[in-house]
Structures are given as structure tokens and as C-alpha cells.
Image: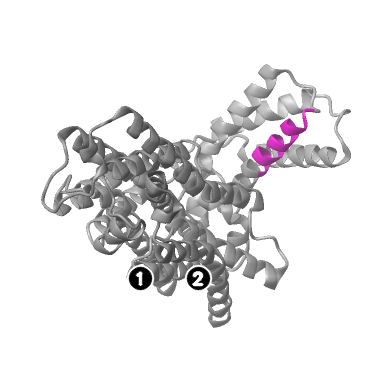
Amino acid sequence: MATGILVVLVICLILACAFEFVNGFHDTANAVATVIYTNTLKPTVAVVWSGLCNFIGVMVGGIGVAMGIVNLLPVEVLVDSSLSHGVAMILALLITAIIWNLGTWLLGLPSSSSHTLIGSILGVGLAFYFINGKDAVNWSKAQEIGMALLFSPLFGFGMAIVIMYLFKRLIKNEVIYKEPKPGVTPPVWIRIILTVTCTLVSFFHGSNDGQKGIGLIMLIMIVFIPKDYVINSTQDIKATYSEMYVIKHYLDKSNAQRLTGKEIEVYKKTNEVLDKVLAITKDKNTVSDIEPEKRFEVRKGIIVISKNIENLFKGKNLLLTENEMRVIETRISQSKSATDYAPNWVPVIISLSLGLGTMVGWKRIVKTVGEKIGKQHMSYAQGASAEIVAASTIGLSTWFSVPVSTTHVLSSGIAGTMVAKKGLKNLQKKTIQSILLAWILTLPVTMLLSGSLFLLFRWLF
């Protein structure tokens, strides 16, 4: 690798870590806001503990969400283009995400790092389409992620109201519904709930938001060193060949006579790609046995086959038994170990960046969450309700491999608890308007900024 390219690669990796670092003190402040504001834990203890839980969350959270980020911007667009164009894309989306996160943090606004990153990716994808006429956004994946980001705050708002209602019906101790007094710790049982939920929110934040950083790193490595990163270097290629062979066998066995015109095209294309992947991987044992320029063909093939078969199964016109379809789905899932992966060093540096970021800069967001969302300061019960909602929502989102905004879920949960107490009049109109404005503007502003930066960098490079 030329010295100049190596320098740019290092800069991109530092920016990706910087994004996660900013994400740490921007988003994770939400996790510690309730335990600090209610005097459940001392600030130093809370942020260090949250940082540690974030670290663990990244390390054990898997890569499902990370691959959602990678697949949002079709990697073939990056690799098939010149290296300079790929670098322009990476720099544009990273710089945009960091600028917006820092800007909203300076204003003390709970803004979503997830929205920021998604908007940045969409911006460079649309700018690429504007120049080349090639579709550079996986719109089906974008729609899936968009729905998760849209409905999670609404879910958080509604569920917080329900949990506050249950608290009121089941727990008659009025202490937990009052504003925390400075220096006075809450009852032991509510401290346990708040500490446990803070732990879970921090852990799930790491397992969800941390994966976005992993996805960024993988995008960078695929752009700069595609021959080494488009396929998992530890992949058993004999296994990949076997998986493709089984899929091909069952597709050939299926009767395609019932397929519609479009389905027939998809069916033929799938068989063509299967033949190509089988030809490349035949008699190969390891990734190193495959010519570097053909490794990307294997990656694209697995992705295309997976997507096409999913669409064919939805049509329900292939004459296959339930068992045969399950076999195909299993083989496809197994084959994705070649494309959906991250080397061990990637989650390590991301978890360190996120964990360290958690330990600084939390005060601005804590004050907004604790005092400025509602007209009354947050009570113990409200803090517990919001954290329960946040932990469960983020945990489920990670389980289903979709990114979700910790900020929006928790902020909407706090707002829900305020409404549950005294109705909509209990919300501070100015703060809610600012949060909603940040929510509404994040996507269009980051899309415009990242697209503009991409065009600028592309011209410069």
C-alpha cells in the first residue's frame, strides 16, 4: 500500500473511532442521566460503570446491526468505483456524523447518533447516484432501518406511560413519585431497579450503537483493502462451495413453471450467480486460494443469492416443501459467515472508543433529561420507567439486528412519564420543540452535508 493511501486509511480509522467516542459521551449520557440525577450512583461511579458495560456490550453484542450498516450502502458501489471515490464517501459520512453529533451536544440536545449516521450514508449514496446514475443505496434496508428509528420513540413514549400507570396502581410509596432531594439517596429497592436498568441500557447501547462503529470500520477496510476484507479470511471455502451446491440442487429440483415473469428473471439470475460462485470456489480450500479479483465476486454472489431467494420465497410460487425451504435458508445463513463478519481487532478498538467516550461530556445531556423535558424535575419512578423502556427497546432491536436511537427512546420515555403524571401540560414546550426539531432536521441536514462533502472531496481527489 502506498504511503499516501496508508495515511488516509489511518485518518479514516481515527475518524471512525472519534465518531464512537463522541457517540459515547453524547448518547450514553442518557443511560447515566437517571442514576446520577436521582442520586442512585455518584457521577464518577455511574460513568465508569456505564463505560465498562458499553465496552462489554460491544464485545459480546454480535455484528447483526453492523452488517445492517454495511449493507445500507451497497459495498459493490464502493469497490467497483475508484479508490478515491470510495475515500471521498467514507470521509464525507464520517465528518458529517461527527460535526452533527458535536453540534447537538454543545447545545445540550439529545440527538440521535443513529439518525446522524444513517443520514450521512444516505447523503453520499444519493450524491453518487446524482453523478453516476447508479443506485448507491439499499432502499429496502433503508426502509427497514427507517421504520425502526421512526417507531421506537413512539413505542418508548407509550410504554413509559403504561409502566408509570402500573407503578401507580401497584406501588403506593409516595416517596418514589417525588423530586429527588440533593444528596439524598432513594429507597434501596428503587436504587436497585435504577442501577440494573442503567446497566442494561449501557450494555444494550454498546451492543447496538457500538455495532454501528464496527460497520463503519468494515466499510473503511473494504474500501481500502478489498482483497483482504470482502471475504472472511478464516472462511472454509469448501464449506461455502457445499452450501452453494445444496442451494443449486434444490433450485434445480424446484418447478419454476408457476413463477411470474419477474420471478422467472430472478430465478434465472440466481442460477447464473450460483454457477459463477460454484466455478470460483470449486476445489478451493481457503480464501487465499481464490484470486484476489474474484473474491469480491464471491461476496456479491452470496449477497445476491440471499436476497433473490428471499424474494422468491415471498412469492410462494416455487414448488418446494417446507423442509426443503428450511434447508435452503439454513445454507444461506451458513454461507453469510463469509460476508457478515468483523476481525477481532475491530470490536476491541470500537469498544474502547465508546467506553472512554462515555466517561466524559455527560453533564450537558444529563441536565436536559433530568430537568428540561418536564416542568417538574424527574422523580425516581419516572427515571425507573424510562430506563426500563429504553433497556427493553434497545435489547429487542439488537436481537432483531436493527439500529435504534438510545437518545430518542429514553427522551421519549421521560416525556411519557411526564405526561402520565400530569398530561401534556407537564412538558416543557421549548425543550420538546428543540428535541423534535433536532429529530426532524437530523436526516435532511446530514444527508445534504454528507452529499455536499462527498462532491467536494470527489472533486479534490
Q: Are marks 2 and 1 in contact (CB under 8 Å)?
A: no
Q: Secondary structure at mark 2?
A: helix
Residue at figure coordinates x 27%, y 41% from the top left? 199
Q: Amino acid at mark 2?
A: Ala
Say if 399 sits above or below 370 in the image: above
Quadrant of the rendered structure where residue 371 is?
bottom left
Which is nearer the N-term, disc 2 or disc 1?
2
- Looking at the rendered image, the quarter that the N terminus falls into is bottom left
Does the magenta stretch mainly form a helix, a strand or a loop? helix
114 or 428: nearer the viewer: 428
Q: Is residue 240 visible?
A: yes
Distance between the Cα atoms at labels 2 and 1?
A: 23 Å
Q: Is residue 22 above or below residue 266?
A: below
Disc 1 target residue: 107
Is residue 315 inside the magenta stretch? yes
Measured from the top left, where is residue 243 in percent x and y?
Answer: 61, 29
Numbered range of the magenta stretch:
304-316
At a point 69% along the width and 71% down the height, the residue shown is 130
Looking at the image, which is closer to me, 83 or 449? 449
Q: Quadrant of residue 302?
A: top right
Callout 1 crowding tier (Cα within 10 Å): few <14, some 14–19, many ≥20? few
Q: Which residue is mark 2?
A: 92
Q: Residue placed farthest to the left in the image?
A: 183
